[in-house]
Each structure stands twice: as structure tokens, then as C-alpha cells.
């Protein structure tokens, strides 16, 4: 997302930059630092990969329907639970973030040609922060569970390892941005889906950029355009 900011309309740049540098994206960085991609063996096991893909599609469709009902605005932790249908946010964290960030990416691309309302940017950042408030609540419940059962919260488990970096209070390194997970992101083998829509790219010509942006409809915005 960050590579698009310099190419946005001037009235969007300050707000887009604040979104990228905000607490919501920072929490996404912590999550990326605390987890790893699945082993390549998963994608070489055809039945397992097929079952995984089918489950992923079903869950994404369900979450997407619920997000559409709320216009992708999450205003408190209760809203997150309504969308996922569970207190165990770790079961739905990745697909929920994927869908929300995909919508945010489309909104950022609309900012190429339109000046967006400031509240649009605020809502995007708040929605991410709310998800991680749910993570914080879940982390505290897990910590209490470990304490009650005289277990070490730092020992790996199904859920605890997901929140370990979040629990330990890691901080973004503003002096060395190349150390941050999002800056280091590269598409890995097995994750380069042909139908992914990530353009426009830095070297695209004007016609290619126009075609990429024309696929995004401004109906996804919650607030009126400012131009």
C-alpha cells in the first residue's frame, strides 16, 4: 500500500500516510512478525490443499457477507464478535484482516483520482485497531488461563504463540523502516495467485493505470467525495 501514497491526489497524501504509519497497520506488522507462512508441503498435498481452500472460501464468504452489512466499519469489539460469531478471534483473524485490508486497498486506489473525506481514513484505521483490541482481550483471557493452570504463557500453544509478540510489547523501528515486516514483504512461492489485483504498479503506463483503477467503484466509500 505504501508505494501508492506518493501517487495519490494531494489532498489524500497526509491522511494516507497517517493510516500507513498508524497503530492499526503497526499491529498488522506485529502479527506478521509472530507467524510464518505454511510449509510448502501443505501445497504439495493435493487433498489437504483442496480441503484448506474450500474451508477458506466458505469462511471468507461468510465474513464478507457480515462485513458488507456493516459497510466494513468496525466500531467496537462487540462488532468483531458479531462478524466472526466467536470469542476466539485467532480462528478468524487472518481472513478478517485479509478482507478488511483488501477493501482498504481499493479505497486507497480510489484516492488516485478523488479526494476522500478525512473520516474515510479515520474509519479505516479505527477498524483495524478494533480488531486488535479484540486480540488484546483474547490475549488477556489466555494469559489468565495460563496463570490459573500454573502454565508459562511463553510456552507455545495453539493460540498463545499467535499473540506472543503482541503480548511482549514489541515496537516499530522508525529509524530503520527496512526492518519492519511490511517493508520486507515479498510474494512467496505458492502465494502468487493469477487473479490477484494489486495494480497499478510503479512502471505501469497511464492507460494501464486507468484500466486498473476503473475496476474500483466509489460505492464502497462511506463518506462523500471531497472533489
Image (cartoon, rainbow, N blue to C red):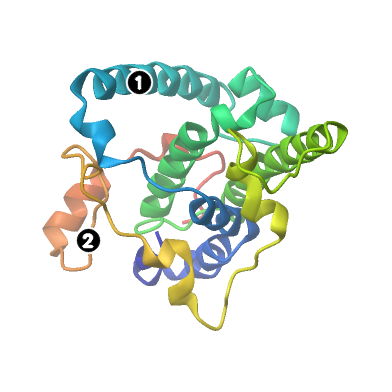
Toward the viewer: 94 or 41? 41
Left or right: where 74 falls relative to 110: right
**Residue at the image point whose x is 42% and y is 53% from the top:** 108
Residue 116's mark? none
Can you give x and y, in whole percent of width and height, for residue 195 in the image?
19, 37
Disc 2 to disc 1, how far (Cα)?
Answer: 27 Å
Quadrant of the frame with the N terminus: bottom left
Count of numbered badges drawn on the protein: 2
Q: Say if 38 sits above or below 22 in the image.
A: above
Q: Say if 172 sits above or below 114 in the image.
A: below
Toward the viewer: 202 or 14? 202
Can you give x and y, in whole percent of width and height, for residue 192 in the image?
21, 45
Residue farthest along the right direction in this orientation: 148
Neighbours of disc 1 within 10 Å: few (<14), some (14-19), many (20+): few
**Residue at the image point whose x is 58% and y is 59% from the top:** 26
**Residue at the image point whose x is 57% and y is 78% from the top:** 174
Q: Is residue 37 visible?
A: yes
Find disc 1 in the rendering and name its residue: 57
Helix, strand or loop at label 1? It is helix
Find disc 2 in the rendering and name its residue: 201
Helix, strand or loop at label 2? It is loop
Can you give x and y, in whole percent of width and height, for residue 72 in the image?
55, 33
Left or right: where 156 falls relative to 210: right
Amino acid at each position: 500500500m505504501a508505494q501508492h501514497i506518493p501517487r495519490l491526489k494531494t489532498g489524500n497524501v497526509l491522511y494516507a500516510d497517517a493510516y500507513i504509519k498508524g497503530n492499526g497497520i503497526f499491529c498488522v506488522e506485529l502479527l506478521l512478525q509472530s507467524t510464518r507462512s505454511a510449509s510448502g508441503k501443505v501445497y504439495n498435498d493435493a487433498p489437504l490443499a483442496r480441503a484448506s481452500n474450500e474451508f477458506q472460501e466458505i469462511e471468507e464468504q461468510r465474513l464478507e457477507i457480515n462485513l458488507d452489512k456493516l459497510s466494513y466499519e468496525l466500531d467496537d469489539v462487540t462488532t468483531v464478535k458479531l462478524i466472526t460469531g466467536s470469542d476466539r478471534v485467532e480462528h478468524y483473524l487472518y481472513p478478517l484482516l485479509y478482507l478488511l485490508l483488501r477493501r482498504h486497498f481499493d479505497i486507497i486506489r480510489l484516492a488516485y483520482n478523488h479526494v476522500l473525506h478525512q473520516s474515510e481514513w479515520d474509519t479505516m484505521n479505527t477498524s483495524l485497531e478494533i480488531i486488535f483490541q479484540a486480540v488484546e482481550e483474547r490475549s488477556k483471557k489466555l494469559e489468565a488461563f495460563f496463570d490459573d493452570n500454573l502454565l508459562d504463557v511463553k510456552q507455545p500453544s495453539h493460540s498463545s504463540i499467535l499473540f506472543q509478540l503482541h503480548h511482549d510489547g514489541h515496537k516499530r523501528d522508525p529509524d530503520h523502516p527496512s526492518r519492519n515486516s511490511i517493508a520486507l514483504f515479498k510474494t512467496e512461492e505458492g502465494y502468487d495467485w493469477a487473479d490477484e489485483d494489486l495494480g497499478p504498479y510503479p512502471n505501469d503506463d497511464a492507460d494501464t493505470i486507468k484500466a486498473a483503477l476503473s475496476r474500483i467503484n466509489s460505492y464502497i466509500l462511506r463518506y462523500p467525495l471531497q472533489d
